[in-house]
Structure formats: structure tokens, C-alpha cells
Image (cartoon, rainbow, N blue to C red):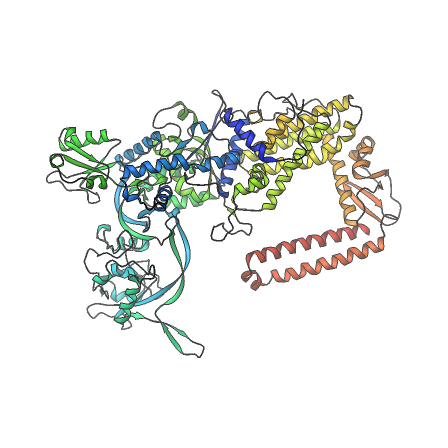
Amino acid sequence: MTSELAKTFDPAPIEARWYQHWESTGAFRPERPDAQPFTIVNPPPNVTGSLHIGHALDNTLQDIVIRYERLRGKDALWVVGVDHAGIATQMVVERQLEARQDKRTNYTREQFVDKVWEWKEESGGQITGQLRRLGCSMDWSREQFTMDPHFTRAVIKVFVDLHAKGLIYRDKRLVNWDPKLKTAISDLEVETREVKGSFWHFKYPLADGVTTADGKDYLEVATTRPETMLADMAVAVNPADERFASVVGKDIVLPITGRRIPVVADEHADPELGSGCVKITPGHDFNDFEVGRRAGFAAADMLNMLDAEANVCQTADGLVPAEFIGLHRFRRDGEDGARELVVARMKELGCLIPHVTTDKEGNAVEHDAEPRTIQTPFGDRGGVVIEPWLTDQWYVDAEKLAGPPMQAVRDGKIEIVPKSWEKTFFNWMENIQPWCVSRQLWWGHQIPVWYGPARNGEEPDEHAVRPVPFVATSEEDLLRQASDYYNKEIGEFLVFNGTEDYLRDGPSLDRMLKTELVRDDDVLDTWFSSALWPFATLGWPDDTELLRKHYPNDLLISGFDILFFWDARMAMQGIEFMGEVPWKRLYLHGLVRADDGSKMSKSKGNVVDPLGLIDEYGADALRFFMAAMESQGRDIKMDKSRVEGYRNFATKLWNATRYCQSNGIGASDTLAAPESRLAVNTWIIGEVTECLEKLDAAMADLRFDAAANTVYHFVWDRFCDWYLELIKPVLGAEEDSPAATETRAVAGWVLDQILVMLHPFMPFITEELWHAQGERAYDLIVAKWPDPRASVDPAAKAAIDWVIDLTTATRAAKNELGIAPGAKLEAWVANPSDVATRTIERSAAAIERLARLTPLHVGEAPAGAAMQVTAGDDVFVIPLEGVVDITAEKARLEKALATSEKEAKSLEGRLSNPNFVERAKPEAVEKARADHAAHSAEAERLKAALARLG
């Protein structure tokens, strides 16, 4: 017995009701202990995050796959959780404190971390509720958090084990330093902005009377960061540059500091760029760091001129003049900094080479610098310019860990989809740099390293905070190691949880008598912990049943932008600790861009809120848009009209179901296709079979667009537009006739198949319609995937497709010539095919009702104006005498054709003009192309209409 549907489809109450039902009944993880496992893990969003359009795409694709595999009977597990987001979360809590005129440093580390946990319990995880609104069928019963105790244990074990293998070490290298947050940050947390800046040219005097080949006693260098000259250690020239061959190995005496620095030969210097000479500041530039190492400078000997807040400090050689000490690196808050003072002093010393321009009168005008637009790195959280800073940090030997994942991709153990991303993957992995995993924060996994004093006569670790490091899984492990090392009892040690804890209490007899061990202050990069996501979420390091069954995962769906930050590192850690790849397939999708193709950003004001789209159109419509537009290797352009179109699609299905209900069509009780004798029913069963085959093939290839469009066109075109139209006479005849009974059974079965096939894409409306169609033994979310056990009947397919072709062609021709859609026209076919003969004999009434052609004659058409339409190989001639005014219609079409051709030619001229294409706004060029295509298509349509008139 069906439940009558409301006249209007309203998604909001349906979505809320069904999601709560699914979650409360455990439908996202049904008990299937003997079923084949299928596992995916979601990229854990930040605990501070809210759903953005990229999340909506990423999680929609994952949910489509997991619902699809669940319907296919697998033990489908979608692991869900959130990342502790070290920097972002600490910033949120610190801002809350600032709002109360409070600050982090008023608390101990433990007290502050407690406050973060309080915030997490009260406000964290907003995004998990938003994922529910999207319809994500995740296993919420096992929701993970990267700071949970079991996960922390896994993180600590990985660090300790990697250190024991020599794959984690402490080193002095350059990092991306955020002077506001006072921590190292990853490349992903650096955003490049265009900044109006300057390009200064300086003279660097050669020492000891040395001159260049052309007699100059100086080398010219140029820089956008003049303040860094206070820590310059060399000037590089290209080894093939004959202009400077005589000065390689000679010295320069730096202005301001008086430091003697060498001229070195290095390929980094480009003879064609500027003067060909490059100042080298190894402690404050990534390229210079490498040049410095090639020149023989050890990292420990590289000069550092800035403190953690990017204020000038004294270099190790003590040559920075006192007037610079304490200045910020450049002008800030209206006060000049080191940059401005360096330029002033260089100008006073005659070492500034002016930038010369010409005014309107042709006079030379000197400027201190050349204006430049500079690509400048900013911290995406702190919002200040990032400083390359030389500091001791913990590093993972990524080069050694990268080998097995590369081999796994080569061997096919990891399939990257689309394959075009393999080249990028290999290029990055083959040139991988050490991975900095330490962060100067309080919130996160504190590095499990403690430092103690050196034993008598022992050389300390040069990179250690204190002389002797102990890497331990716990304090108990630490004390055991320290007891063995120092040959003392466990009670003879004092353990401090960081420098702050160590400095809090003054000297005491207890401290004097005991050996003090101080924990490293830093925490681990959040990418370090999330790299363990595929196996730590399943219980590792314990040998759990869940881990044995669901590792390796089957699929990872990820944005291409985190291929290296997350995906590659999961592959490294998975193979290292599990001995197997973390997942068998890696699907990389593109970005969701604004409608004009530009990247979405808050500053541009073009960010689209997915929750707003759900409010307006429903989650099903947004999900279907994401799937239909997700073409492998391409970004998606946001298009609200398409989302609206898919809302209309949902409404179409809703109304089609209402029509079925009004004609006694309810739920089917069979998985296999019902028996059918009528050609139209046999045809639609075959269409279901074809649709299912195409859908399964598309899903196997992860072609989400092909899968979505396959089911869309079947539902809209074949079922709603044609099948329901074709069966109206049968349903309108005697209610209990065998034909009507068969048709209701087939139509109910087809609608069920539609609901199942469409469910992964549009879960809410399909579940609602599934239950509205009658009593069900189970919810749609855990139903069985279609199994028609039927094939395409060639004769039925040929007949029905022929009627559809004839009707479509006739309607199009009428539209072109302005003939009323309902007008009945006489038609002739001279040499009908076998299909035409059979179909005309059996389905003349259907042809009359749909194509409005009656009577149909076999033979030559009478002479006179006529139009032709085709169906398959058959050509029908339809006389037009008395139907349209041939002369007037020709005149109308010719006038419209001339207009369209004129517009198309004009637009073609604009588009062939390089000045327009290169200088106009991209959206203007795009509109011109679209208009040109539209006018060209209209011209072709009008030509076809004229041709019909003869």
C-alpha cells in the first residue's frame, strides 16, 4: 500500500528525518561479519573547520562510493574523524583568551592544554554536524580524533621507532618561520600574495685592490630584501661567466658590517639575469642555503640575524652595528625597520646604485629602487610575511621512506586515478626534501624526547637542546633508559615537561642531588599524525580484528592539493609500519572554482557556502551537481543554475512517483525483472539492464560524471519522458486486464531499480520514495543492488526506439517551422524498413498520440512543398500545403538566419583579435565565445528549417 506523497517536494524535513533514522538504527555500518570488506577513510577535517565547497565535493564522492558498495552487500566501512589542527586550534583558544584580556603565557602548558580540551568539548567538531547535513554515511560510532589516547600512543610509537631506525633526526636547516605565531609551518600553510615592493641595486666593494675584467672594483648585486645583507656570507657568479672569472675565490668587504665574504662560482647565478652576481644569505633564503652548503658552509656556521619575532639580533661574528639590533626586519606600524636603515646607510656610503627613469620632459630622474610586484610568502594563519629561518628542528628522512611508495605505484599496488597524476607524484617523490615535523606550539603531540646532562668526558649532541637526548614511549621507558645510561636508581631523577616546567622552581637540595631530565618543548606537525590515519584509526599498534579486516583500505579520495602533504606520507608510513600499501587506489579530484573559473577566496568575495546551497536546493541537488561535474583531471566551475537544475530533476522524480501512485503502481516484490509480453515493458526492462551495466562500468572506473549522467538520462529521458508516456493508454484501459497488471508490475519494478541506482547520488529523496511506494522489509540504504537477470530484447528495443526517434524528429521539425505541437499531420513513407512496417501495424495509435502523425501512408507522397523527418533508416515526407504559408515562413527564416550569421561573424572577428582575447576580462572573452557558439548553432538550425521547406 503506497503512502500518498505531498504535491510539492520539500527536501529539508525529509533530509533531517532520514539522517537521524539512519544514524540511530546503525544503518551506516550494518553487521556483515562474513561480507567482503570495503574501506575508505575520510581526510580528517580540522576540528576548528566548517564545511566549505571543497569538503562538499570530497565527501560527496566518498559517500557515493560507500553507499554504492554497501548496496552491493559489502562490509562497507567509512572511517570518520577530525584532526586536532595544532596551529589553528591554538590560535582559536588564544583569541578567546585575548578577548578576555588574558593570554596563554599566564598559564602553564598543562593548564593551557586543558583549556583547549574544554574548547574542543564545547565548540569543536562543528563540521561533523555539517557533514551529516550533506548526507555522509560515516561510521560515527567509531569517530576518531588525532589527540585521542589510542591515537597518541600510535603517534609516539611511530616517532620512537623511526628514530631508532635513524629515520628521524634533529638538524639545523631553514624552515618557513611565522614570526607572529613563532613556529615553523608547512608549505601548505604558506600562501603567496602579490605585494608592491622594490628592487634595490648595491655595490659590493672587492677587497685587496682586486678588480673585474672591465676594471670595476665592486660587484653589483640586486635584492628585494636589503636587510638580509647584514648576514650575507658570499656572492655567487656563474662558473661559465667570463666577466667574473678573475674574481672567483677573491673577497668582498661588505659595507655596513665590514665582513669579508668570498666570491664563489655556482650554477645558481644566471649570467643573463641582472648583473649576473647574486648575494648569498644562507641563513635566510632557501636557494642561498643550498648555495652555501655547496660552497662549504656548515649549517651550524651559517649566520642568523633575526630572532623568533623577525627582529634583528647579533650575528655569531658580532659584526652587526648596534643601531640595527632590535629593529624589526622592515617597516612596521609606521616605524622604519632594518630594511629602511640598510638602504639609508648604503646610500650614505655611496654603495646604492640608483634606478634611473625619464620624466615627461625627457630628464633623467633617480630613484633609490626599481618598483616591482613581488610574489611574497605569507602565513595563512598568522597573516604576516614568512621568514626563512635557520633553526634546529626534527626531521623525517623522507628520501628513504619515499622509495617503497614509488615502487608500489610502478608495480600497480597503488593505482593513481587519473593516471596523469603519476608524473607529478614521481617528480616530487624523486626530489623530496627532509620533512620538518616539529612545531613550536603547546597544543599537539609533544615530542617524546627528554634531555639530560652529559656524562664526564662525553661529547654532547650538537643539535640537542641539552647534551643527551632520550627518545622514549613513556616516562617509565624514559626512566629505564636514563637509569641504564647514568647507572642510577630510578628515584634519582627529576622529570620536567619542558623548559617552562624546568625553570618554574628555583634551586633546591632535591634538584642538586638528582639528575634532571627535561622534555622537548615542541609538538609534532599535524601531518605527522594524520599520516597514520589508514591504520591508527583501526586500532594499530594493537593487532585488532578491525585492522586485520580493513587494512589496506580499498580507496582514498583526495584533493590533488594534498597529494604530497597527506597522501604520499600515508603511503610512506603505511608501508613502513604495516608492510603493505595503505590503499589500493588513490583518486585525485580537482578544485571547485568560482563560476568564472577563478579560485575561490574570501578576499575576492566569491566563496560559495555549501550549506547555503543545501538550504536553497537541498543536499541531494548539491550532491548530484558535484558528481555530474566531477570529470577526471578537471576542476569544477560552480554553477548555481546547474544545482537548481538537479533540484528540478529531483522534483521530476517526485512527480513521476506521484503519477505512478495515482495509477496503482507500488513497490515491487522481486529483485529480478517481472515477466513481460508488451514491447514497451520488455523495452524498459532492457533499458534498466543497459543503464545498470553502464553505471557499474563507470563506478568501476571512478567516472563519477559518467555514472551520474547515465542514471540521470535514464530517469529523465527513458522513464519519465517516454516510458510513462507510452504506457498511459494501457493504464487508462481496463484496470484488471493482463496488459495493465503486467505494466503496473513492470513500472513498479523499474521505479524501484531507479531508486536503488540513484540512492548513492541522491540518498534522501530516494529513501523517502522507497518507503512511500509501500511496505518494505528494509531501508533503501541497506537494500540489494539491482540484479535484473534480463537482457535487452532487440526487437522490442528497435520498435520503441523507432517510435521515439520519429516522435522526436517530428516535434523538432514542427518547432523549427512554427507549427503547433498538437497539430496532426499526414505522412508518407515510400520504402519502409521491416521495423517501420511492424511498428506502424502494431503501434499506429501510439504514433498518432505521440508524434501526432495520422494517417500514415506507405507510398510516394504527393507533389508540393513538404518537410522530411527520419526515424532510423526511414524517411517520412509530410506535406505542408495548407499547414504553413511557405513564402512567409521562408522570408521569416531567411531574415532570422541573416541576423544570426551577422552576429556570429561579428563575434568571430572579436575572438580572432589577439588584443581582445589577451586584454579583455576573462569573463568577457568567455561570454563572447558562448554567444558565438549560440548564434552559430541558431544559424545551422535555421538553415535546416529552410532546407525542410525546399
- The residue positioned 20% from the left and 40% from the top of the image is 504
Q: Residue 764: in sight, yes or no?
A: yes
- The residue positioned 58% from the left and 46% from the top of the image is 639
In depth, the one of 945 and 422 nearer the eye is 945
Vertical order, 93 against 657 (above or below):
below
Which quadrant of the view contains residue 828?
Answer: top right
Position of 361 with respect to 113 (left or right) is: right
Task: Please state the total of marks drawn on the protein image.
Answer: 0
Position of 273 with respect to 860 (left or right) is: left
Q: Residue 273: in sight, yes or no?
A: no
In depth, the one of 796 and 537 nearer the eye is 537
| Residue 642, horizontal then vertical, whole percent | 60, 44
Which quadrant of the view contains residue 661?
Answer: top right
- The residue positioned 31% from the left and 37% from the top of the image is 113
| Residue 839, horizontal then vertical, whole percent | 79, 33
Q: Quadrant of the N terminus?
A: top right
Position of 589 with respect to 675 (left or right) is: left
In depth, the one of 126 and 178 nearer the eye is 126
Which quadrant of the view contains residue 799?
Answer: top right
Vertical order, 221 against 824 (above or below):
below
| Residue 221, horizontal then vertical, whole percent | 31, 65
| Residue 881, horizontal then vertical, whole percent | 88, 48
